[in-house]
Image (cartoon, grey):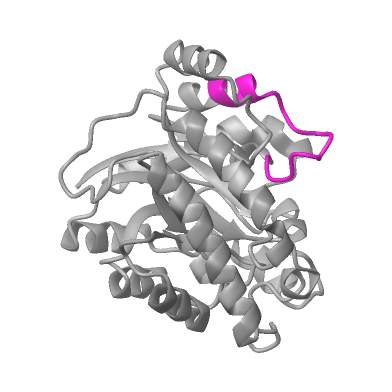
Amino acid sequence: MHVTITTAPCCWGVDDVHNPHLPDWRLVLDEAAAAGYGGLELGPYGYMPLDLATVAEALRSRGLAIVAGTIFDNLVAPENRDSLVRQAQAICALVSRLPQPSPVPGQRYPTPYLTVMDWGHDERDYAAGHSDRAPRLLDAAWAGMVGNIRAIAGVAAAHGMRPVIHPHAGGYIEFGDEIERIVADVPADIAGLCLDTGHLWYAGMDPVAMIERHADRTDYIHFKDIDRGVFDRVMGERIRFFEACAQGVMCPIGRGLIDYPAIRDLLERIAYGGFITVEQERDPRNAAGSIADVKASRDYLQSVGF
């Protein structure tokens, strides 16, 4: 395998840019570099500055690269399209102009990517991980979401970036039937997939089986791990996904349920190359423990052949 392990600001609790407890973005860069990562994602819209010179110099001085930007918003509401397109344009205008690593064997598309995730629906947030009680979109609403994704993808393509749809716990693209439906409705020439081992497992799927099933569409991958004890408890509660994360449902890789040697064997078998981003959502008030956790995840992955 030709793989570079990267990370993301969510490991420092950066998911909601309005949270008053977020760490400074420069601290995140410092600690990502200190923990041995080759790069990271930009994080949610509005977290890092969108000034090219400022971000480029901050990355250069730390030996890092931004390998993906993120749209993490309500993809369903028709009235949100203008906002989604504005976000995509601002993110892509920055990220596409930053220096990028050279592609490697097995990497289907060069960086940077634009990960596209649905979020912002109470009825799905409280049903995260529970396929049997999570409402599904009716056909008209689904078609509207597909239209929004296509609009975002068009912006990314215009900037030379590969858009990748990320199934996410608590959004309207989470469970197996929804992944199958979005793959059918958004063809490969429009967007790929960013499959996330933790979100797949959280939603009741085997990450190895799902990545193998969709190997021809998986352009980018996220790694997480899940604490069995916390997971079993929160599945019995009415709880939002990020509340579960604040309680530690996501743990350093190698300390949880997911079989990473099996995932390594799969990625070797399908000749995956490129980038894998480690994530561990948490409460930003606990960000003082982030560097130890991301270092533990990086060290474990190295120990099993990544």
Q: Is residue 86 left or right of residue 121?
A: left
Judge whether residue 102 is colored magenta: no
Tell me, yes or no, if residue 59 can be seen here. Answer: yes
Residue 25 percent coordinates (x, y): 64, 25
Furthest-bottom residue in view? Answer: 132
Q: Is residue 119 above or below residue 109?
A: below
- Highlighted range, magenta: 14-30
Residue 104 percent coordinates (x, y): 19, 39
In which quadrant is the C terminus drawn?
A: top left
Residue 236 percent coordinates (x, y): 76, 78
Q: Is residue 24 above or below residue 207?
A: above
Q: Looking at this view, is 157 or 293 the one in front?
A: 157
Q: Looking at this view, is 257 or 93 the one in front?
A: 93
Identify the residue at horizontal 81%, vertical 34% (top origin).
Answer: 21
Q: Is residue 290 above or below residue 248?
A: above
Q: Is residue 204 above or below residue 36?
A: below
Q: How many marks?
A: 0
Judge whether residue 22 is colored magenta: yes
Identify the residue at horizontal 63%, vertical 74% (top origin).
Answer: 129
Q: Looking at this view, is 5 or 94 the one in front?
A: 94
Residue 121 percent coordinates (x, y): 75, 68
